[in-house]
Amino acid sequence: MILHFVCKTTADTQDLAKTIGAHVRGGDVFAFKSDIGGGKTTFVKGLAAGMGVTDVVQSPTFTISQLHNAAHGLELHHFDFYRLSDAGIMRAELAESLSQPNAVVAIEWGDIVHDILPNDEIIVDLKNDSNDDTRYISITIPDDKQHVSTVLKGLK
């Protein structure tokens, strides 16, 4: 299922993601696609807020990965593969995160590691309007992620 949203402001993007974050489960994987400045980190910040993460969430562009403790025993594993043409040694760290039952994994520039991502990843494709903060967001949700699709259908 693919759902489409138009977010007029950065706050709207974060609110959409926060709603999703409040309903995620361990094992959920989010792969983000967009141009530079497309809103990937903005979305992850909202996702983290919805999960109950209280520390500052920033793009791990230079550190490549960050771990955030969330509510209800969940962890947010945030990766950014922008600077890499190949996952290299980060492939093992990502694989370990994907195997943890309490981990929600958010991957910016996930195309680089698409071959090791599970088939039930949630794909978030963000396109921005160069004239303002409007973002056109398409979220592809696999059939077995009804806890996400149900809440998003309720927003339509």
Image (cartoon, rainbow, N blue to C red):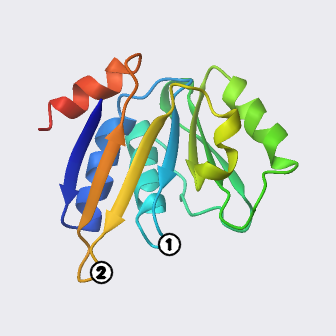
Locate residue 51, reporting x and y percent. Answer: 44, 37
Locate residue 18, reporting x and y percent. Answer: 33, 44
Locate residue 110, reporting x and y percent. Answer: 60, 49
The residue lying furthest to the front in this view is: 115
Q: Which mark is residue 24?
A: none
Q: Are marks 2 and 1 in contact (CB under 8 Å)?
A: no
Q: Is residue 53 above or below residue 85?
A: above
Q: Is residue 22 left or right of residue 40?
A: left
**Callout 2 secondary element:** loop
Q: Amino acid at mark 2?
A: Ser
The residue positioned 54% from the left and 58% from the top of the image is 57
Q: Is residue 49 left or right of residue 27?
A: left
**Callout 1 secondary element:** loop
Q: Amino acid at mark 1?
A: Ile
Camera-side residue of 70 and 17: 17
Query: In the rendered image, which residue does mark 2 sit on?
Result: 130
Q: Is residue 104 above or below residue 63?
A: above
Camera-side residue of 86 and 153: 86
Q: Is residue 56 above or below residue 117?
A: below
Q: Which mark is residue 36?
A: 1
The residue lying furthest to the right in this view is: 89
Locate residue 4, reporting x and y percent. Answer: 23, 46
Q: Earlier in the sequence, mark 2 or mark 1?
A: 1
Q: Is residue 135 above or below residue 112?
A: below
